[in-house]
């Protein structure tokens, strides 16, 4: 009995020791996945979008990751027992779990007119050594980001929006005017913003020789919504242009303005163009299904009337037909016959005289 009891005690002691490692591995995998999701959703880590082997990915720099983890140490509590790891060790663990991919810039040479490489390249490639580094190293997230609820609901609204756009001709007149002026106002705002932005850049470049782009990311495809409306311009990293180039482009700009002013349309041409455009817009805005149905009814009535007139004309024409056999000598006027005979005699006398 003692041996059996000892054997049971040994079994009881061994069972928890054998089951502990797999639970710990599963927990470590879950906590690192949760940590990666929290870090990716946090606004403190500066990230950009780029193209990695024909795929758009979100990436960050190694030095930014180290600074972020050290400044936000509360996020390390998610790692539980591994919260004492250094930022480099955490990044290497994420690389081993395929949650991160180390990348490298595709263009490794400085472009003409630049002093150094771009801080955020637009094209990346996979680096051969998947080890964390702070020096000019980029890391892209390798997992699919979870969609928030509002994005899921918004995806169901796109078919409704498409159907609403297709049904624009049947909208009430006031709704058409509202949509027209809203879209025209937004388009005018965008064009004015781009024009003023280019005008400020050209004036500062010609006068001071510096490149200053307000709203620098307004035309960037890889920029996020927050970066898209960044007002303050970025620091100029290029070389100062020569005064000869600035003078040349200033003269070209003045000549272009004078040519455009000389060939600008006059008031009559502008009025004709405005009238033509307004007529086209009025045709679109004033169209309605009732007008379409009334137009169809008018065409049907016109077709039936034309068919009836054609049948009546055919009947009247058939009644007025006169055959050549019924024509007698009385049908030809006598005066016409005398003129014809006289002309024939005159022609005979002329031939005899010749």
Image (tube, rainbow, N blue to C red):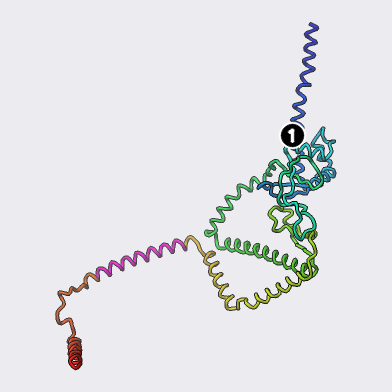
Residue 276 placement (x, y as % from top left): 54, 71
Residue 285 placement (x, y as % from top left): 54, 64
Q: Which residues are magenta?
A: 291-316
Snapshot quadrant of residue 102: top right
Front-most of residues 288 and 202: 202
Residue 46 placement (x, y as % from top left): 78, 49
Seen at 75% across and 44% down, the residue is: 139
Seen at 71% across and 41% down, the residue is: 142
Front-most of residues 88 and 180: 88
Seen at 62% across and 76% down, the residue is: 264
Give the farthest residue toward the front: 354
Which quadrant would the C terminus be assigned to in this image? bottom left
Residue 88 placement (x, y as % from top left): 82, 40
The verdict on residue 303 being magenta is yes
Seen at 60% across and 76% down, the residue is: 265
Residue 12 vs 346, above or below: the answer is: above
Count every numbered label the image shows and give the total.
1
Which quadrant would the N terminus be assigned to in this image? top right
> In the rendered image, which residue does mark 1 sit on?
30
Residue 151 located left or right of residue 209: left
Front-most of residues 231 and 287: 231
Front-most of residues 258 and 168: 258
Q: In the structure shown, which secondary structural element does the residue marked by tag 1 occupy?
A: helix
The majority secondary structure of the magenta stretch comes to helix
The verdict on residue 117 being magenta is no
Residue 70 located left or right of residue 321: right
Badge 1: residue crowd in 10 Å (few <14, some 14–19, many ≥20):
some
């Amino acid at each position: 009995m003692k041996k059996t009891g000892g054997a049971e005690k040994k079994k009881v002691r061994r069972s928890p020791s054998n089951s502990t490692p797999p639970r710990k591995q599963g927990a470590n995998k879950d906590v690192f996945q949760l940590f990666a999701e929290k870090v990716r959703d946090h606004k403190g880590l500066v990230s950009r979008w780029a193209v990695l082997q024909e795929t758009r990915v979100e990436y960050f720099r190694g030095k930014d990751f180290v600074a972020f983890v050290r400044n936000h140490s509360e996020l390390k509590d998610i790692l539980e027992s591994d919260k004492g790891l250094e930022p480099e060790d955490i990044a290497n663990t994420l690389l081993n779990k395929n949650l991160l991919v180390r990348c490298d810039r595709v263009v490794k040479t400085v472009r003409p007119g630049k002093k150094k490489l771009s801080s955020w390249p637009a094209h990346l490639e996979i680096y051969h050594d998947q080890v964390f580094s702070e020096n000019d190293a980029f890391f892209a997230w390798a997992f699919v980001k979870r969609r928030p609820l509002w994005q899921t609901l918004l995806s169901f609204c796109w078919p409704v929006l498409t159907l609403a756009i297709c049904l624009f001709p049947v909208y009430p007149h006031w709704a058409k005017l509202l949509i027209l002026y809203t879209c025209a106002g937004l388009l005018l705002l965008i064009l004015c913003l781009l024009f003023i932005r280019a005008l400020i850049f050209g004036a500062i470049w010609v006068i001071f020789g510096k490149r200053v782009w307000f709203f620098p990311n307004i035309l960037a495809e890889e920029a996020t919504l927050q970066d898209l409306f960044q007002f303050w311009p970025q620091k100029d990293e290029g070389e100062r242009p020569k005064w000869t180039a600035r003078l040349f482009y200033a003269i070209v700009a003045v000549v272009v303005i004078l040519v455009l002013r000389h060939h600008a349309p006059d008031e009559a041409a502008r009025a004709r163009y405005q009238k033509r455009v307004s007529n086209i817009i009025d045709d679109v805005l004033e169209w309605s299904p009732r007008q379409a149905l009334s137009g169809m009814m008018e065409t049907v009535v016109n077709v039936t009337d034309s068919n009836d007139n054609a049948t009546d004309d055919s009947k009247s024409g058939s009644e007025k037909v006169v055959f050549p056999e019924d024509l007698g000598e009385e049908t030809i006027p006598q005066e016409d016959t005398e003129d014809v005979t006289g002309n024939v005699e005159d022609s005979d006398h002329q031939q005899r005289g010749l």
